[in-house]
Image (cartoon, grey):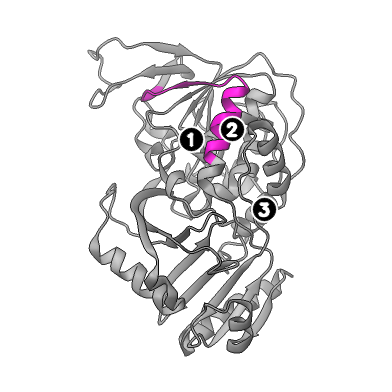
């Protein structure tokens, strides 16, 4: 991705529904260009972004079946250093971007076969990695269990502290003039076009003709970036609802881990997956489950046990750390695991949601794409496969302009 594109549309009023890392990145980017931006979220920064581990890992997350998603992730990863520099300059906050990469580890024969498949995929895409023996992996990360059979070192997978990123985005956006409304809203539609948002109360159906009158905030464009709740934003017509579902993830934060690990470890232990992400201030993030149970933010004993048991198998010293926090959030999943980025079938509505496990990674690419659409500029080719209309049965993908 290149630096933020230049826009001549600095007089636009933009309403952003959703205050996670995607919504905040978009709001900050557009406000820098002179747009009058308002963000609507009853708890900005406290959704899935609050639980994210912050891995910028298109390589480790790569799949044979998702080459287009890998290409988008790699493009966004390339944009992250410049994005982080601008964000730190605008907010005064360091977002904790690290460049140590990640270590992928397997513990039994099946796990090792899985690593070989990943190595083959990385080779096909000419992506860097080093194949390590158990001894070499232990030399790289002395706290790693000696029972690890094989490992791959991916130098191209950095990470950020996602909570610092959100805090920096909130600060930078406010400094750029973004207004925040801690309120649930839905789009206002006049003559088949989104012309703003209307405040709603929990339980109020905007589609009912006898609904109570609520405040309306006019806007030239509305951006839907509500994460896992995007499909249930009140007032959206069915044809404009993105096919986003909540995928529950439970995650742990442990204290007292300063110096324990030098890089992210992503391990498969007898088929069970876990990642351990060290923070500079001595915290260790351990995650995460992936549960198709609908909207459910309950932290369960079974999930905590599974994550801790697997993490201790990978790094035995984890057993001595302090359990500081357990939490659950819902990621926004889509039928093809790809995000939904672009102009919707509802004129005046742009969509930026469905980022699943990669919201933090894809923030630079997504905010750049929405900025380009607002500016009537073509989006990069890596973004085009993720246009909303791919789910509408239409062969036409919106790649430029604001419908």
Spot occupied by residue 19 in the image (x, y as percentages of width and height): 47, 33
Q: Earlier in the sequence, mark 2 or mark 1?
A: 2
Mark 1 or 3, which is nearer the eye?
3
Asked whether the beta carbons under mark 3 and mark 2 sit within 8 Å of each other, the answer is no
Image mark for residue 26: 2
Which quarter of the figure is the N terminus placed in?
top right
Count of number-bearing discs: 3
Residue 291's place in the image compared with 332, above or below, is below
Q: Tell me the CA gap for discs 2 and 1.
A: 9 Å
Judge whether residue 374 is colored magenta.
Answer: no
Q: Earlier in the sequence, mark 3 or mark 2?
A: 2
Spot occupied by residue 229 in the image (x, y as percentages of width and height): 37, 39
Image mark for residue 212: none
Q: Which residues are the magenta region?
A: 166-186
Spot occupied by residue 347 in the image (x, y as percentages of width and height): 53, 24
Which residue is pictured at 61% across the width and 50% down the height? 96
Instruction: Identify which residue, 58 or 337, lies in the foreground.
Output: 58
Residue 127 in sight in this render: yes
Q: Earlier in the sequence, mark 1 or mark 3?
A: 3
- Label 1 neighbourhood size at 10 Å, few (<14), some (14-19), many (20+)? many
Which residue is pictured at 51% across the width and 58% down the height? 282
Spot occupied by residue 343 in the image (x, y as percentages of width and height): 57, 33
Instruction: Identify which residue, 396 or 377, lies in the foreground.
Output: 377
Q: Which residue is mark 3?
A: 77
Image mark for residue 225: 1
Left or right: residue 326 versus residue 381 is left
Q: Tell me the CA gap for discs 1 and 3.
A: 20 Å
Asked whether the beta carbons under mark 2 and mark 1 sit within 8 Å of each other, the answer is yes
Under circle 1, the secondary element is loop
Instruction: Identify which residue, 332 or 40, lies in the foreground.
Output: 40
């Amino acid at each position: 991705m290149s630096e933020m594109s230049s826009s001549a549309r600095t007089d636009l009023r933009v309403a952003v529904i959703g205050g996670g890392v995607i919504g905040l990145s978009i709001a900050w980017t557009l406000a820098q260009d002179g747009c009058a931006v308002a963000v609507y979220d009853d708890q900005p920064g406290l959704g899935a972004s609050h639980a994210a581990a912050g891995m910028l890992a298109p390589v480790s997350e790569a799949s044979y079946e998702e080459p287009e998603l890998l290409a988008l992730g790699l493009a966004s990863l390339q944009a992250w250093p410049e994005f982080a520099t601008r964000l730190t300059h605008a907010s005064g906050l360091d977002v904790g971007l690290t460049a140590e990469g990640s270590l992928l580890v397997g513990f039994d024969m099946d796990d090792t076969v899985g690593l070989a498949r990943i190595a083959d995929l990385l080779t096909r895409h000419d992506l860097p990695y080093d194949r390590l023996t158990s001894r070499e992996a232990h030399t790289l990360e002395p706290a790693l269990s000696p029972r690890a059979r094989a490992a791959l070192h991916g130098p191209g997978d950095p990470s950020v502290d996602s909570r610092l990123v959100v805090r920096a985005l909130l600060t930078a956006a406010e400094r750029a003039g973004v207004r925040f409304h801690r309120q649930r809203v839905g789009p206002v539609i006049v003559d088949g076009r989104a012309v703003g948002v209307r405040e709603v109360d929990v339980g109020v159906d905007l589609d009912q003709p006898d609904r109570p009158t609520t405040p309306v905030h006019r806007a030239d464009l509305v951006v839907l970036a509500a994460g896992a709740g995007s499909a249930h934003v009140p007032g959206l017509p069915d044809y404009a609802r993105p096919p986003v579902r909540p995928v529950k993830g439970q995650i742990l934060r442990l204290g007292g881990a300063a110096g324990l690990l030098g890089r992210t470890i992503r391990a498969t232990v007898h088929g069970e997956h876990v990642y351990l992400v060290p923070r500079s201030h001595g915290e260790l993030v351990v995650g995460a489950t992936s549960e198709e149970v609908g909207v459910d933010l309950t932290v369960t004993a079974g999930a905590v046990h599974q994550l801790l048991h697997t993490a201790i198998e990978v790094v035995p010293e984890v057993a001595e750390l302090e359990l500081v926090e357990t939490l659950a959030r819902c990621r926004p999943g889509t039928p093809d695991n790809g995000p939904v980025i672009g102009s919707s079938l509802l004129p005046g509505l742009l969509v930026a949601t469905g980022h699943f496990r990669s919201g933090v990674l894809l923030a630079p690419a997504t905010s750049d794409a929405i900025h380009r659409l607002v500016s009537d500029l073509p989006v990069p080719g890596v973004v085009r496969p993720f246009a909303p209309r791919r789910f509408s049965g239409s062969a036409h993908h919106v790649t430029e302009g604001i419908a």
